């Protein structure tokens, strides 16, 4: 049984991972009405650091709508995937405070290189004291570009509350392949599943990986693209995954945000039926 989550990434203006288009007050209620049970929150939707009343107000808004925080990204550096991406691992206390205030059980973090493994262990130990899990997303320009690479780094981190956010689009762009048994190396480490869709392009969004550069154009989840969601469904069923499915598409120019909400939840429903 899956729970459907909507990433606020869809409402962030292009090239500004911390900015905001429509506000949570505008899109949260339509998301709940469409069938989502959670939101994947990012810095664009969070109060300024130290604003405890702002966090309490946000928690009340979500509770009133019956929405959970499926995953929480508190550090902007994680989204930018830059040289500072791993700094927060040594400074987890404030990030854990935010998770506690919002009732979030999972924080998305970044392990930018193998040298950061010790920091990941430290962060996981800090989070475990509060019953919170941490996860690294499959992502370009990281040691987690493919499932096999992720499995090796997770073995090095060796913490039960540190796992993986499976994201097949980045995996494909980084040379991975979609098949039914692809998740077996991380069968007990998949903490969330982020889904986006794209088409190869001669120009557009440049994705730099450890293997080179690719150009893509993002598209709605339901439209033809590179992601075979039936294989995703089979792979999740193969490891008996039951948890969050998160619509993780970025802002799509020319697409009304309400259309994104309804299109994505329909596709997530299809994945559930294909089990």
Image (tube, grey):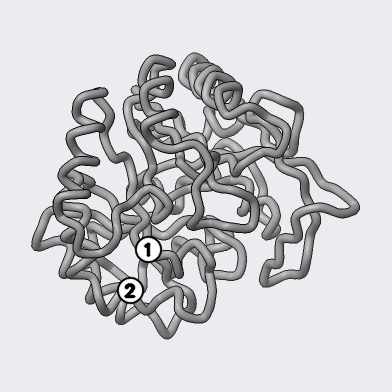
Q: Nearer the observer, disc 1 or disc 2? A: 2
The location of residue 29, given as percent across then percent down, is 36, 22
Circles 1 and 2, Cβ within 8 Å, touching? The answer is yes
Q: Residue at x 40, y 76 (%)?
A: 86
What secondary structure is found at the residue carrying circle 2? Answer: helix
Q: Residues within 10 Å of mark 1 (few under 14, many from 20)?
A: many
Q: Within 10 angstroms of label 2, few (less than 14), some, or many (20 or more) residues?
A: many
Give the residue pinned by disc 2: 88
Q: Which residue is mark 1?
A: 109
Q: Position of residue 68 (x, y in %)?
A: 26, 34
Kindly identify the residue that appears in the image at 17 percent across and 69 percent down.
93
Instruction: Give the residue displayed 32% in from the left and 40% down from the top.
Output: 70
Indicate the quadrant where residue 241 lies: top left
Q: Quick check: 167 left or right of 156? A: right
- In the rendered structure, the answer to whether residue 230 lies left or right of residue 46 reads right
Quick one: which residue is furthest to the left in this view?
129
Q: Residue furthest right?
A: 202
Q: Is residue 106 above or below residue 116?
A: above
Q: Relative to 67, does residue 123 appear above or below in the rendering?
A: below
User: Which quadrant, please, contains the N terminus?
Assistant: top left
Asked if one can make out residue 2 in the rendered structure from this viewpoint, the answer is: no
Q: Is residue 26 above or below residue 269?
A: below
Q: Is residue 38 visible?
A: yes
Which picture quadrant has residue 117? bottom left
């Amino acid at each position: 049984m899956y729970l459907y989550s909507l990433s606020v990434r869809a409402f962030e203006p292009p090239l500004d991972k911390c900015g905001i288009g429509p506000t949570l007050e505008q899109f949260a209620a339509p998301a709940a009405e469409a069938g989502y049970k959670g939101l994947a929150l990012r810095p664009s939707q969070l109060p300024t650091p130290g604003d405890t009343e702002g966090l309490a107000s946000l928690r009340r808004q979500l509770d009133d709508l019956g929405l959970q925080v499926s995953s929480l990204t508190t550090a902007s550096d994680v989204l930018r995937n830059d040289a500072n991406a791993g700094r927060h691992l040594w400074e987890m206390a404030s990030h854990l405070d935010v998770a506690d205030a919002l009732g979030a059980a999972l924080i998305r973090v970044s392990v930018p290189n193998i040298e950061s493994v010790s920091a990941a262990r430290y962060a996981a130990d800090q989070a475990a004291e509060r019953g919170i899990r941490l996860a690294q997303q499959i992502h370009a320009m990281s040691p987690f570009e493919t499932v096999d690479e992720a499995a090796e780094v997770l073995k090095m981190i060796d913490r039960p509350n540190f796992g993986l956010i499976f994201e097949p689009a980045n995996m494909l762009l980084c040379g991975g392949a979609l098949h039914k048994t692809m998740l077996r190396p991380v069968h007990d480490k998949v903490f969330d599943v982020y889904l986006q869709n794209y088409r190869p392009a001669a120009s557009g969004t440049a994705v730099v990986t450890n293997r080179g550069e690719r150009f893509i154009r993002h598209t709605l989840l339901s439209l033809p693209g590179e992601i075979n969601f039936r294989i995703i469904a089979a792979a999740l069923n193969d490891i008996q995954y039951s948890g969050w499915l998160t619509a993780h598409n970025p802002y799509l120019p020319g697409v009304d945000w309400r259309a994104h909400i309804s299109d994505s939840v329909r596709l997530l429903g299809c994945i559930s039926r294909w089990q």
